[in-house]
């Protein structure tokens, strides 16, 4: 049984398309057009001249067999001549000193109790931020019911009101380490990502088809199609007054900026109709990079007949312009593709529902390669800290740190040196333990990074974790004094192997243990 519906169409209708063609007919007005479109007659045999050789090394690079999960994450926090935590420590202390000397604080001002942040403290701070993505609460204060001192130090570290432009050096740093630690395979994708934010800000955007977040700051992301590895990020700065706009549009500029380091390697870039244009496709092709994408039919440079086409379902119309194909495919609606690598040959594949789906090969190619950024979003959403009342620049910073953990996990999963691999939750917990290490409130040290950072020792640490394998237990505290409480919970202390509720029960159980 054949069916033109299915998961292929579902994806295409929210994105882009692709195709190739065969024998062509000369249009009557070809002599008057500088770059005319020719009709492809035999769509099943027409082929573009494409060099599909790809000889680049791919996958993780620079990781060793004895690396622990936190070692993988550390690779995304430092380079040979730079350390992100060192930089954050310096800037945090500099800003605190600046505030103390310019604000004329009162006698009881909280800034009077400020003490310089150390390397170990900042490292533990990042670990705590990541831990908040594992065990989620409604506010930052609710994480610190047991210790007002730790709460104050945490909030003082995280209360900088720096403008958004201060985040640019951090974005540049992560772009550098993302590129150093992973080599992309042939199929890559450019798409938008939203950093969730519902407060007031000039950069807040709305994208209706993003399931993770619809409101927030917009990032342009280059990712690997098959793994979702985030390779490069550009933060959308919005339309600026008194500045000249790019002559080819923001979509053109974003793709060229992200893909520029990969020109001449025969990569294939997939994009949606926000980015695609005939000029972008041709310029990428001239630089040794192939591309496929859906495109708005009324966009400049496309065949005029595509704008008003009224065709029956299943129709395919193909036009060629040198090394570029424009394909109009009619399914639930008209979808237009541009491609410099694919064709319009009909391909039959079995969809996720077990039905045979017939569509041009460009549709299948698009569906196979377009989901890389969305895949990364799914991995991010699992452990992204959710804070209310947090400034946008800080949301972006936390998103970048979580992206680094996701990339570290992708490298870990794809490193052939690792034989027995942890799942994502256990990997994230191991990273948090490694970052916090032996740091304690009473062990605070002044100054910069020590020569040797203590290695995490899970036996001496007590953390509230999610019970593995989806199992549930009774809380040993509240079930002891409330016999009517029968609802099992999903959290426990993995060291003590007992079920404990988040917050009061966890604190009470371990406080009694210490007193005894």
Image: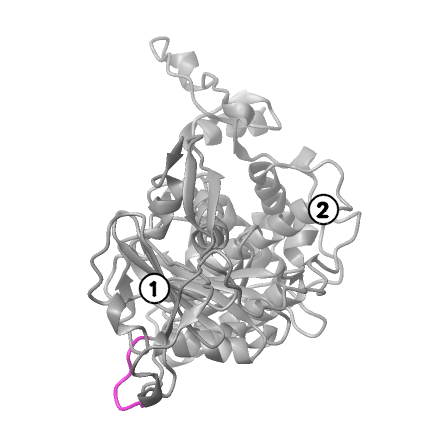
Q: Give the magenta part as a residue range.
A: 238-244
Q: Position of residue 186 (x, y in %)?
A: 61, 61
Residue 109 is at least partly visible in this image = no
Percent from the top left, x then y, of residue 450? 71, 62
**Alpha carbons under labels 1 and 2: distance apart:** 33 Å
Judged from the image, the secondary structure of the residue bearing numbered disc 1 is: strand
Q: Is residue 317 left or right of residue 283?
A: left
Q: Main secondary structure of the magenta part?
A: loop
Give the residue number, with chain letter if any, for mark 1. 217
Q: Nearer the viewer, residue 355 or 159?
A: 355
Give the x, y percent position of residue 356: 43, 35
Name the residue furthest top.
483
Q: Nearer the viewer, residue 122 or 264?
A: 264
Residue 495 image-quadrant placement? top right
Disc 1 vs disc 2: which is toward the camera?
A: 1
Residue at the image point whose x is 59% and y is 23% from the top? 516
Identify the disc placed on residue 68. 2
Residue 281 in sight here:
yes
Which image quadrant is residue 261 in? bottom right
User: Residue, x 35% and y 85% (percent of image)?
Assistant: 246
């Amino acid at each position: 049984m054949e069916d033109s519906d299915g998961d292929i169409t579902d994806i295409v209708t929210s994105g882009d398309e692709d195709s190739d063609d065969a024998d062509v007919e000369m249009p009557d007005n070809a002599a008057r057009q500088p770059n005319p479109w020719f009709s492809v007659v035999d769509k099943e045999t027409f082929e573009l001249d494409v060099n599909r050789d790809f000889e680049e090394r791919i996958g993780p690079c620079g990781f060793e067999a004895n690396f622990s999960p936190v070692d993988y994450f550390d690779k995304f926090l430092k380079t040979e001549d730079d350390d992100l935590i060192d930089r954050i420590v310096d800037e945090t202390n500099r800003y605190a000193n600046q505030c103390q000397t310019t604000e004329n604080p009162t006698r009881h001002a909280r800034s009077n109790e400020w003490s310089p942040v150390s390397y170990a403290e900042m490292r533990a701070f990042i670990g705590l931020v990541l831990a908040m993505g594992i065990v989620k609460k409604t506010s930052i204060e609710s994480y610190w019911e047991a210790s007002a001192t730790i709460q104050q130090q945490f909030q003082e570290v995280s209360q900088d009101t720096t403008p958004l432009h201060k985040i640019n050096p951090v974005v540049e740093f992560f772009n550098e380490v993302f590129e150093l630690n992973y080599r992309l395979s042939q199929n890559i994708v450019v798409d938008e990502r939203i950093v969730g934010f519902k407060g007031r800000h000039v950069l807040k955007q709305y994208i209706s088809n993003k399931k993770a977040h619809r409101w927030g700051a917009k990032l342009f992301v280059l990712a690997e199609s098959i793994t979702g590895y985030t390779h490069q990020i550009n933060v959308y700065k919005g339309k600026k007054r008194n500045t000249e706009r790019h002559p080819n549009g923001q979509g053109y500029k974003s793709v060229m900026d992200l893909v520029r380091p990969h020109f001449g390697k025969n990569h294939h870039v997939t994009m949606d109709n926000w980015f695609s244009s005939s000029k972008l496709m041709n310029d990428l092709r001239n630089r040794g990079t192939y591309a496929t994408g859906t495109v708005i039919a009324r966009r400049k440079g496309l065949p005029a007949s595509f704008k008003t086409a009224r065709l029956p379902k299943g129709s395919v119309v193909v036009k060629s312009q040198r090394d570029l194909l424009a394909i109009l495919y009619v399914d639930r609606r008209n979808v237009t593709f541009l491609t410099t690598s694919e064709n319009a040959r009909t391909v039959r594949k079995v969809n996720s529902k077990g039905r045979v789906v017939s569509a041009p090969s460009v549709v299948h190619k698009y569906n196979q390669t377009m989901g890389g950024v969305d895949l990364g979003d799914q991995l991010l959403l699992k452990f992204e800290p959710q804070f209310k009342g947090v400034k946008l620049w800080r949301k972006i910073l936390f998103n970048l740190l979580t992206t680094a953990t996701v990339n570290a996990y992708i490298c870990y999963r794809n490193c052939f040196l690792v034989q027995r691999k942890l799942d994502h939750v256990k990997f994230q917990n191991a990273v948090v333990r490694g970052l916090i290490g032996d740091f304690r409130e009473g062990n605070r040290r002044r100054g910069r990074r020590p020569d040797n950072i203590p290695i995490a020792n899970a036996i001496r640490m007590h953390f509230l974790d999610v019970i593995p394998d989806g199992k549930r237990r009774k809380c040993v505290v509240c079930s002891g004094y409330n016999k009517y409480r029968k609802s099992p919970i999903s959290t426990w202390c993995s060291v003590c192997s007992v079920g404990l509720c988040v917050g009061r029960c966890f604190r009470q159980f371990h406080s009694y243990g210490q007193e005894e």
